[in-house]
Image (tube, coloured by chain):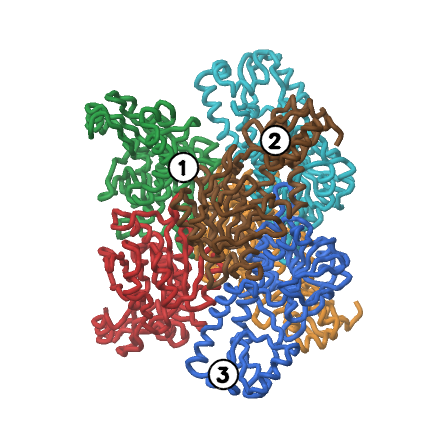
Chain colours: A brown, B blue, C red, D green, E orange, F cyan
């Protein structure tokens, strides 16, 4: 890339990608991480769109991980007549948790959602009255995980690595061949035993529990994800194209939030932010 | 097995399994195919239970086949906000078609069901008013397949190999990387280009379309399927255990329908039967 | 009553009411138990109407029995945001079980239904997909009762006293202050520890569990029950009024099924019959 | 209690509890009424949680008051096939009214809600499209009450005794044995003929109408209510425990709103506030 | 038409069309009224399809008749926030009544259905629990009509002119500018004041009430109706085409039911039959 | 009207009504356009109420325009069993679009909604998950219109004439006898080929497409509209009545927004504003 040019995209620049950061700085590139664009009310439209897709994908991936040919328990998410459905525990009632719950219910599962915020639980309760809601704390998490067929880690804390809510001891107490999907793995994960995996080798077994910890889950529904991300980013891309990147950054604080590197200077690295469910 | 003993189970004895038939005959074994047990109203409870599970599995398998890491189009069944959902075409409105439609709707798809029977369409319409119903004929099938993301072949004709409803020419007219799931492959398939695959190598590409043609789909949710099948078969197993197999066959015509071989004689091979949706 | 006259009503004549039977016989009264009127397809329209009301009442009575001022656990059927709902176990998937399940779901409970008939479970599953269905046997009943907040006995067997499905040992394994409602108490009850109570003193405690065993539950919603029963009985009452009782009995086998005493002779006592859910 | 200590709980200190206030002042106790904790957006999380439970309880209590053994009309909330459901009139579309409407619909009632705020009606309409909404004024209230089986008074006005919306004359125009539940009785009531009752003697009859006016309705589902209230209060209790009460009051204006007495001084008595339905 | 040929179509030959009958007889035409084809279980597939469309059309026509520019009351079927919905009374719970109720509910109306059959009411209640069901008799009809905004006459009695259920006196008691739609007008009507109208002049006013009595309502959605009717008739048309009309009549009793004239002889005129809702 | 008096009502004063403006000015009348009253959050309660009714009316008018006796295609909005439903395209996801979508779904249509705002699409998606949502741009509009049976123009841009989104070329690409309803015609319309029509002559044909462009649609449900508009305006009318118009204008900025002419001076003409869907 020619020095001095601008770059906009899903950058996900964290300290783990230092080489890429160095290159951007060396070439004095202005890099705008679209996923970090933030409106004045704190919402992040591009991130929201991708989190929504991630949440929608959780049920179909969980369904596969429960099939025996994939090493799973050999059960159907929704059970069938005379056979109870799978027990799903979702930790985190943000957009990922809401979308995952919606899909699991559509497949007939029994779904419980835990969160520290009673307001977040209220919102998911209003939307899906048949979901069981519980205040999240070490006791409720341990108890819920002990009977879960699938545990979904969907926790994000603004500006921080997510806390480790599911400890190794809790994992040890889970049923054999049950499934953990740590969707917060992009930001470090909220399960003690989780470590990033890939779409090629998505799972590993630890303490007898199947772990799925693939960052960037929307990557496997690339066509849908691309449309969704462009839809959300389009107004900002248009402004940058029409007015020039420098002007757009100067005039629109939402875009300014996305600037990672600016003419050779490091502005700020990607931080973790929570994605609340919009009403 | 000791000659003269009786055997009950999911036998699926067709002419393709001649060696197994020969062994049963040679050892004068009385073999009862539980899946062929048939009540006086023509319904087949064990078969029905397994067909229901097969239908429930279709959406989760289709979802995976649309992921790009599995070679698919990279789309999400339900689309997302601003991106339309997948178009699902189900040919056959029996129990497989009903259960598949139910799950696809739960994931947010747009679902159309074709059948030659207006009564079968009426039943699925009453249950799921948002499903589009169409009379099945070569014209409607060709038109529907042309815009489908997923085509599900769920057609069974009593006592016969299912007709080839989706011809190679129709397949040729489908969108690249769209998906065909031929659930009727157990009985020979209703798609000209389909041939049996396995859970290990479940798909192949023909005319640019991904084909999934695994017989015995419930096999990958073995635990749920076993419970369901035992639930349905239990009254008959109990009668055979309590009264002896010969007495049970003599007294209960439902069980008699399941007899494949009887004391060294071939009674009748497995036939194809339609599984209507019960109300 | 003048000897030789006819009497039609909800008679519920069982051997426990021998004095009433004697009086009918001594006075040569023709007594028609409307609840025993039976159509040629085996259905019993008046009984069905009353069973439906009984089933509808179960949730509101259970709700009260869980209130602490009535001696209960002090929980709300539907829980609330952050607090899980009550666990309801219904044994029997006939009309009582279906109507009870419908109301419990409306109040936000988590409902499981057990039955020996996979067909009956299929019907309730089609109607209420979020109900968990299980094949009923001693193992599943014991397990389900162990975590129940409310157990509803809704079992009827044609022509027999209902079997004792919930043994004293199972009751002993239930949670303290949980509730048993034995709706089959009219026919003898399906819970070992149950005995008839009255609307004035509806409950007793046995093995630490609150028992509600009031026969004739619709009696406390007398106005609704009377309308429902007259609605169902009206065609038969009309025929008796128009044609005379003797002619109506002779011409209409449905009415003939209801005759308890006929001109001084005992015809047949009330028998227990199952009330299947109509589609 | 040792002078100078702090006290936090559901205090409900009104002028009617002057003796308790005097004791708090004499002992220089800092008393924090958790139910008065108020966030910067005006919402009151603990009060909201309890109001929600109160609203959820209304339908099950109304159902019982309509039973004839409790002196009621002998009707079933949902009616039954061939018999129309009960007519429910709810005055006030806040959280109590919303939760009550939700439960009544679940039991099959026909529900109308009145409120002076078109916005509040819009919210309940969006959530429950089958609820009839009406602007509340003396004419609509009188007309609606005249055909009601149950009238629910669920009106709160910020900082004031609720207005008397249902006058004695309106009560006189109601059907015999119909039911009034004045949920706003905690703050003085919105029905002219209502006066506080107790869980032991919950009802009285005035103008031929059954009145239920028990303050603190959640008291009879104590276990659920306690969990809900602790869930909502926990973040504030934690802050007081971690930082000390004085610091917490000083730093957190939400907690400051809850202070009734502070080191021997009366801060402010409990006021009535409206609890809007959160989206 | 050449004498001796056969004719199949929607003939609706009644005594009012004597000239057409004479022509068929004179020309020795075999005329098959497709709408009279009847299966061995008594169901009539072509008639059913058209009755379903008729029922679906009722709500949209009623909506227009309530608009003031069409002479109506100027109200919206569903009301709006703060304004109650229209009151719809449907007399007859067959397929017309069911489909009409479904659409009215979709537009937000409050719907009551009356029928003499408790079984028919049970079916509509199972399908649409929010519909009020009432046993039909002169008292309930008069009371319901007195507060109706729209009355739908959807009554058919097998083999007979429908009874006059809504008398002139009942019509007189209806609200000014309310609407009567007599869908049974094809068979003579069930409203005393109704007389056939046309699509060009569809309404008249009698006793201050707007009457809509257009026979053959599906005629105005001709494209949908034609597809539906061909779908239902296709198997029979195919058989006649393949085997010849005479053979088809001889072999298939369902087709034989449709024969109006046969080689110069009058077989039987069209009779009225009830169209039950299929499950 | 006496000079110097005040006038409040639905004025809709635009430059097209210059004569009326002149009269108001000449007589020094203070004219308050209630539909322009605007709260501090930008919402406009009276306009919102009328827009909601307009949206609710769209489906019933579209249904009629598809009937062949009104010149339409002869199709039923919801199709029927075996016949697909109509394709509805709604451009604009504000209150008109939401209410229209709700009613179309109730009649069984397949509905797609386009909007430039992903947030607006998210809101309609949360409310109606079965609606297809698409980002609106010339490409998506043209494609959607090409297969539509009904196109609804429901676009408003704050303070401006709505943009022409459906060009003549797009109209030319629509199916013969399909329908365009330009609900934004009050503000100038968003369809190039549209021009205002009247309730007496509501439609014209251009490019083979039926156009319905009647301003003030709620005028044909005058009774419902009047109630709704008074409900929304009542608090403001009350204030003007109690305090006098001048004082009310001075004290309440919401009312001030509605002033068109003030004591002989023109204040501001009606502007176009967007009516967002409230949650």
Name the residue tied to disc 2.
A37
Between marks 2 and 1 in the image, the one whose residue lies nearer the viewer: 2
Callout 2: chain:
A
Q: Position of residue C243 (x, y in %)?
A: 38, 71
The image shows a total of numbered marks equal to 3
Q: Is residue E176 above or below residue A177?
A: above
Q: Tags 3 and 2 in contact by the CB under 8 Å rule?
A: no
Mark 3 burial class by Cα count in 10 Å: few <14, some 14-19, many 20+: many
Label 3 sits on a secondary structure element that is: helix
Q: Is residue C75 visible?
A: yes
Q: Quadrant of residue E263?
A: bottom right
| Residue at the image position 61 percent from the left and 80 percent from the top | B20
| Dot 2 and dot 1 within a common chain | no
**Which image quadrant for residue C46?**
bottom left
**Both labels 1 and 3 in a single chain:** no
- Residue A181 placement (x, y as % from top left): 53, 49
Q: Residues within 10 Å of mark 2 (few under 14, many from 20)?
A: many
Residue depth check, mark 3 versus mark 2: number of the one nearer the observer: 2
Residue C38: x and y in percent read 40, 71
Which element type, helix, strand or loop, lies under badge 2? loop
Please state which of residues E208 and D203 is positioned toward the viewer in this rendering: D203
**E202 over E81 or under it: above or below:** below
Per the rendering, the mark at residue B249 is 3
Q: Secondary structure at mark 1?
A: helix
Q: Looking at this view, is F72 or E146 the one in front?
A: F72
Quarter of the figure with the N terminus of chain A: top right
Residues tagged 2 and 1 counted as in contact (Cβ below 8 A):
no
């Amino acid at each position: 890339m020619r020095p001095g040019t601008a770059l906009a995209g899903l950058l996900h620049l964290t300290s783990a990608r230092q080489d890429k950061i160095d290159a951007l700085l060396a070439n004095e590139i202005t890099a705008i991480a679209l996923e970090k664009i933030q409106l004045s009310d704190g919402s992040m439209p591009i991130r929201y769109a991708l989190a929504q897709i991630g949440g929608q994908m959780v049920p179909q991936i969980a369904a596969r991980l429960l099939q025996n040919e994939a090493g799973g328990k050999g059960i159907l998410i929704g059970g069938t007549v005379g056979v109870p459905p799978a027990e799903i525990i979702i930790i985190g009632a943000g957009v990922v948790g809401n979308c995952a719950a919606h899909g699991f219910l559509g497949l007939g599962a029994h779904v419980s959602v835990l969160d520290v915020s009673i307001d977040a639980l209220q919102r998911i309760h209003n939307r899906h009255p048949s979901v069981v809601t519980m205040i999240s704390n070490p006791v409720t998490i341990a108890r819920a995980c002990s009977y879960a067929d699938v545990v979904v880690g969907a926790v994000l804390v603004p500006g921080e690595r997510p806390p480790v809510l599911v400890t190794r001891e809790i994992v040890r107490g889970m049923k054999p061949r049950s499934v953990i999907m740590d969707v917060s793995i992009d930001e470090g994960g909220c399960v003690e035993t989780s470590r990033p995996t890939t779409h090629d080798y998505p799972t590993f077994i630890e303490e007898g529990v199947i772990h799925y910890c693939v960052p960037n889950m929307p990557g496997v529904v690339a066509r849908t994800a691309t449309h969704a991300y462009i839809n959300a980013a389009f107004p900002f891309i248009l402004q940058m194209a029409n007015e020039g990147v420098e002007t757009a950054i100067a005039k629109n604080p939402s875009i300014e939030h996305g600037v990672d590197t600016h003419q050779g200077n490091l502005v700020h690295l990607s931080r973790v932010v929570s994605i609340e469910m919009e009403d």
